Amino acid sequence: MRFVIDVGKCIDCGGCWVACKDINDVETGIERIRIVTLNEGKTGEKSVPIQCFHCDHPACMLVCPQEAITKRDDGIVLVNQDKCVGCRYCLWACPYGTPQFKKMGSVMEKCTYCVERIDSGLRPACGGFCATKAIFVGKSASEADAKASSIGAARVKGPTNPDAAYKGVTL
């Protein structure tokens, strides 16, 4: 599984954000996906969807003192909110700033890759509801790799080996 994002197609419409909020019943104040604008108001302005990349080596999981963050065999990184104590070590460790906290003392929230949808054979909401098809979510690494190759997307590089490929921007 991997996110493949064609930044040139993203128009910052918020469709992915709304779909995520609606399908996952995400609380106000939490953003499991966000759109970051690079070079705002200048030539080359780009809108970049950012969510948890479900890294091969998740730094958030490594630093969690409660072992509340786990990785499934299919690569999905999840948070057991019953174990989370809100220490925020995961936020400090994540190079992408994806862990979210509604307020001080609250437990961590992040993209779940729409795990319930995945388990039902569906794709995550963000990709399914993207109006311009800027976000593609592969059901397998080989499907995602084929899509990334077909559009010329490059896998994100970093110390945690994020499971995402982007076309049009280097993260």
Image (cartoon, rainbow, N blue to C red):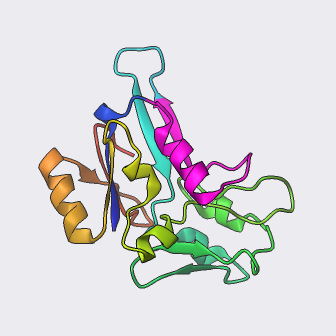
Q: Position of residue 96 (x, y in %)?
A: 53, 53
Magenta span covers which residues?
Answer: 12-37
Q: Position of residue 149 (x, y in %)?
A: 15, 54
Determine the residue positioned at 86% across, 62% down: 105
- Residue 26 falls in which quadrant of the image? bottom right
Depth check: give the residue in front, 120 or 111: 120
Instruction: Give the position of the N terminus as an image quadrant.
Output: bottom left
Q: Is residue 15 magenta?
A: yes
Determine the residue positioned at 38% across, 62% down: 123
Q: Is residue 147 magenta?
A: no
Whether residue 32 is visible here, answered yes or no, is no
Determine whether 47 is above or below 128 in the image: above
Determine the residue positioned at 57% across, 81% down: 70
Q: How many marks?
A: 0
Q: Is residue 21 left or right of residue 156?
A: right
Q: Is residue 139 left or right of residue 85?
A: left
